[in-house]
Image (tube, coloured by chain):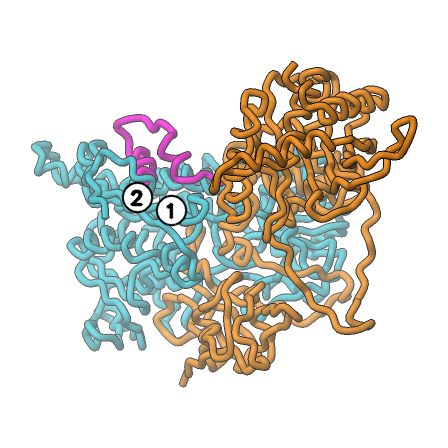
Amino acid sequence: MTTNTSNLDTEIVVLGGGPGGYTAAFRAADLGKKVVLVERYPVIGGVCLNVGCIPSKALLHIAQVLHETEEFEQYGITFNKPKIDLDKVRAWKASVTKTLNDGLAGLVKQRKITLVHGVGKFTSANTLSVEGDSGTTTVNFQQAIIAAGSHPTKIPAFPYDDPRLMDSTDALELKSIPKKLLIVGGGIIGLEMATVYHALGSEISVVELMDQIIPGCDKDLIRPLHNRIKKQYKNIWLETKVSSIAAEKKGLTVTFEGKDAPISETFDAVLVAVGRQPNGKSIDAGKAGINVDEHGFIPVDKQQRTNIAHIFAIGDVVGNPMLAHKAVHEGKVAAEVAAGHKAAFDALTIPSVAYTDPEVAWMGLTENQAKQQGIDYDKAAFPWAASGRSLSIGRKEGMTKIITDKATGRILGAGMVGTNAGELIAEAVLALEMGADADDIGLTIHPHPTLSETFAFAAEMITGTITDIYVKKN
Amino acid sequence: MADVIELKVPDVGGVASIDVVEVLIKPGDIISVEQPIATLETDKASMELPASAGGTIQQVLIKPGDKVGEGTLVATVLVNGAASPPVVSAPQPEPAVPAANETKPVTAPEAPAPAPAPNVGKPADRTILATPAAINDTGLSVKAHASPSVRLFARELGVDLAKIAQGQGRKGRILKDDVKNYVKQAMSTGVSPSGSVGIPIIPAVDFSQFGETEIQKLNKIKKLTGQNLSRVWLNLPMVTYHEEVDITEMEAFRVASNAEKGKGEVKLTGLLFIIKALVAALKQFPSFNASLSPDGESLILKKYYNIGIAVDTPNGLVVPVLKNADSKSINELALDLAEKSEKARQGKLMPGEMQGGCMSISSLGGFGGTAFTPIVNAPEVAILGVTRAKMQPVWNGKEFVPRLMLPLDITYDHRVIDGAEGARFMAHIKQNLSDIRRLLL
């Protein structure tokens, strides 16, 4: 270990090289700013690229291929039972990540951004100290953008030193395929990992505290997913709490408190996916005078400014939802404001996607929210059982739902469940941002036969012009 | 234990019906005791309704425009600061960080916004904090109808899109051009275009300091008429010309004609003859039967003769139009006018019956007066004013003779009609009314 110290002067320092951070750094550099990007890991890309979105999608694609080949047996196509070479799977996953890592490294170079590896902490409102393998770098900055991200929530009493207790990062490493796997937390991450491990052969149980999986999403959108995984998984225990986990030789013995769950059961591995906590408390924000709330979030205004006018914060560390696409958008806003532009975060919605099978995606107002807020709305839900495209890929459980304002007809929210719902939701987001109403959507020609048609069909159900199904008039 | 408490309108001094102007809370808001939850307005005053209990709002049962009275249920509030638990999928009652996950959607878009922590930095640095979550939720239906690029453009120019009521795009969507026009207008007038038209406004005065006052809301017709008249007043350079017409013979004929009429037949009024004389003058002077093109470059001459008649109704002034007055006899016009006037008074005129006028007549003959200056009903270019006819001594060259004299006023748009033309037009009407036989020619 060396104790080198060095100094760097820069216009803008970006703390954290995840999607929000590198986007902010790139945008600031493109606007002519001198930029230093600080990243604690050897590669940039953050949770999303290294231990989140991207590797999980690679594994989910494998799960999809496994499921589809199996399911098409009933339609006359039979494959041999697949052989899974975990080393090769891991290598492929790693190669996907590496391709993107290398791409980002190239973009950093092209933009002449100074990349400093190490853990960055504020030492004043204009200095950041970065502890790296090769010593300490002091960065003197004019403006800073905090993109320090979040980490998985840990439950103190659980035996985290036991390798059989995993968080999402561990689970993505795919060290082994446990026979019996318990997923604690029926949210999006938990269910995505359940999809992967189920396809690779684990027997899955899911435990969730609330009365539905993916809490916060409308129940009707969740139902097709729930019905499918109910058959695939051993157990889905709702309204159930894990009271303790004991590490024993034979496995992890978990005790439950809940209506349908057993008192205790032993699993070969347990994945805890109960949310994430912001990293606001681990950057010595106080030394720069930056406010951090009790949870570790850094409050910001619409221009991503913290209480210290020349320091911005973006992404997971400023609040929910903790999503890469939110962070990227905020990163651009922060960089533009720092460069003197009048940017602001004024997106009308941040879409949500669960890459489960079937996928679940929603945006804008959920029906639950519309009800809570007393909004007068119209609603239509088009069943994919009436979509030729859906049937021809062997699936019929999907649904496309749309919620419009009764007075103006404008779209307020949409939700989809089914194959590729995550891709399809983007059109609904565009419709919302453009202020489209049900007529606009219905009168836009959608190619046939596609799953995208279902969005137009749902709109036509609202305008009363649908012909693909029969809706009885009142 | 959480209790649900109902927030109601308290005794407000026996006023039975109070308008809700603004609702200041929404479900999920955390409020404290005495915090205003709604703005109410009576005809005398507007007041803020304080919360009788603090907690988390569960339901809001009123909306702007509602009428409320003592005891009306306004909202329900869950008392016990803990509020509804954030939607968390933590399996233990652990610190309630709203659940989120890796990089994917969150389970709780409605999670309470992180409360701003106490000020560490300079207070002056702080702007109002809004979390993206707060921006992300609700109120979508009331946002300006503008696409993201237009919102960006407006932000750069510092334009509040809420001030642009209606865009030029399909379904009122605000376009870049609307933002540009708004800015142009603001620059040229120096004041907000949504206010008055670039002239200093009349300062507000609290009249109640001088004695008792009462606020009376203007009805819709009054408001629209007011806007229209102000617009005309500011746009048109107007001249009014006064004249007196000898209608002694005309009146004798009118009285005689009415005497011949049976019971129930519509009687003739002087106004009908004036309409006829006006039509004849319009035929002679086409520039009066015209409108200026919007660009001010040309005159649009009309080949039809529709006359608007200003009618005083309990709800305000309306102007029904007598169509094709040139092809109707005086008796036919009498029927038409009686029918339209009755409809106007009953508020049953259809919009089509008030459109298409070429020139209007405003008659105050029923009230008296000697002269007035009517305002042109633009885009028409002139209006004829009538006050009460009076027997007057008129010098006939040898002696004073009693003649029935009718005062007429014409106001015209000076951009279209010059003074001599105005005088000739009136002379034509005068000639025709003095000797109504000419109307046959």
Q: Kindly identify which chain the residue marked by label 1 belongs to.
A: A
Q: Residue furthest right?
A: B398
Q: Which residues are magenta?
A: A435-460
Tell me what residue is drawn at x 35 percent, y 41 percent: A58
Residue B218 point in image, percent of width and height: 64, 55
As drawn, the chain in orange is B
Residue B59 point in image, percent of width and height: 43, 70
Amino acid type of the residue tagged 1 in the rendering: Ala
Looking at this view, is A310 or B249 the one in front?
Answer: B249
Instruction: Point out which mark residue A414 bears.
Output: 1
Task: Judge the density around disc 1: few (<14), some (14-19), many (≥20) Cα neighbours within 10 Å.
Answer: many
Task: Give the mark nearest the N terminus, 1 or 2.
Answer: 2
Looking at this view, is B84 or A151 the one in front?
Answer: B84
Instruction: Point out which mark residue A50 bears.
Output: none
Q: Residue furthest front?
A: B398
Is B122 part of what is drawn in magenta?
no
Tell me where residue B433 sits by quadrant: top right
As drawn, the chain in cyan is A
Task: Tell me the element at label 1.
Answer: strand
Q: Is residue B233 left or right of residue B260?
A: right
- Classify B330 as above or below A2: above
- Classify A344 as above or below B304: below
Tell me where residue B388 sits by quadrant: top right
Amino acid type of the residue tagged 2 in the rendering: Thr
Residue B368 point in image, percent of width and height: 75, 47
Residue B40 point in image, percent of width and height: 59, 69
Q: Is residue A209 left or right of residue A130?
A: left
Q: Are marks 1 and 2 in contact (CB under 8 Å)?
A: yes
Q: Kindly identify which chain the residue marked by label 2 belongs to.
A: A
Judging by the rendered image, the residue that carries numbered circle 2 is A400
Tell me what residue is drawn at x 47 percent, y 36 percent: A100
Is A447 part of what is drawn in magenta?
yes
